Image (tube, rainbow, N blue to C red):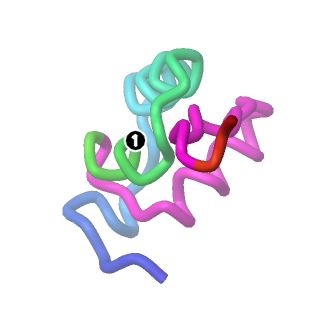
Amino acid sequence: MSKSNRNSGKQWTKTDVAQLRDLAKGNTPTRVIGLKLGRTEDAVYSKASDKNIPLKPTNQSPYGKK
């Protein structure tokens, strides 16, 4: 589980949700979204689920491909 960040326990603002939506649309990794918003990964997953924001799988590294 992730460590607490600066906004841990605070209410999400409309700006936070809009930024979450934009970052998710850009296929940003969840950990990076959490760092940018000052939230834990769990909080990001929870809010994305509440707002029906899809968190696509991030691009995978090319290792192991032929």
- Residue at left offset 54%, top offset 46%: 63
Frontmost residue, 14 versus 5: 5
Q: Which residues are magenta?
A: 37-63
- Residue at left offset 31%, top offset 43%: 37
Frontmost residue, 60 versus 25: 60
Q: Residue lying at the far front in this picture: please name it.
A: 66
Q: Is residue 58 magenta?
A: yes
**Local SS, label 1:** helix
Question: Where is residue 10 shown, x and y percent of the image?
Answer: 37, 59
- Residue at left offset 28%, top offset 50%: 35
Question: Where is residue 3 shown, x and y percent of the image?
Answer: 32, 79
**Mark 1: which amino acid?**
Ile
In this rendering, position of residue 53 left or right of residue 35: right
Q: For residue 13, what is the image quadrant? A: top left
Q: How many marks?
A: 1
Above/below status of 31 relative to 57:
below
Q: Quadrant of the C terminus?
A: top right
Question: Where is residue 11 shown, x and y percent of the image?
Answer: 43, 52
Q: Is residue 51 magenta?
A: yes
Q: For residue 9, what is the image quadrant? A: bottom left
Frontmost residue, 52 versus 54: 54
Above/below status of 29 relative to 59:
below
* Number of other residues with Cα within 10 Å of mark 1, as a class: few under 14, some 14 to 19, many 20 or more: many
Which residue, given by chain and number where applicable, does mark 1 sit on?
A: 33
- Residue at left offset 55%, top offset 25%: 27
Question: Where is residue 2 shown, x and y percent of the image?
Answer: 40, 77
In this rendering, position of residue 10 left or right of residue 51: left
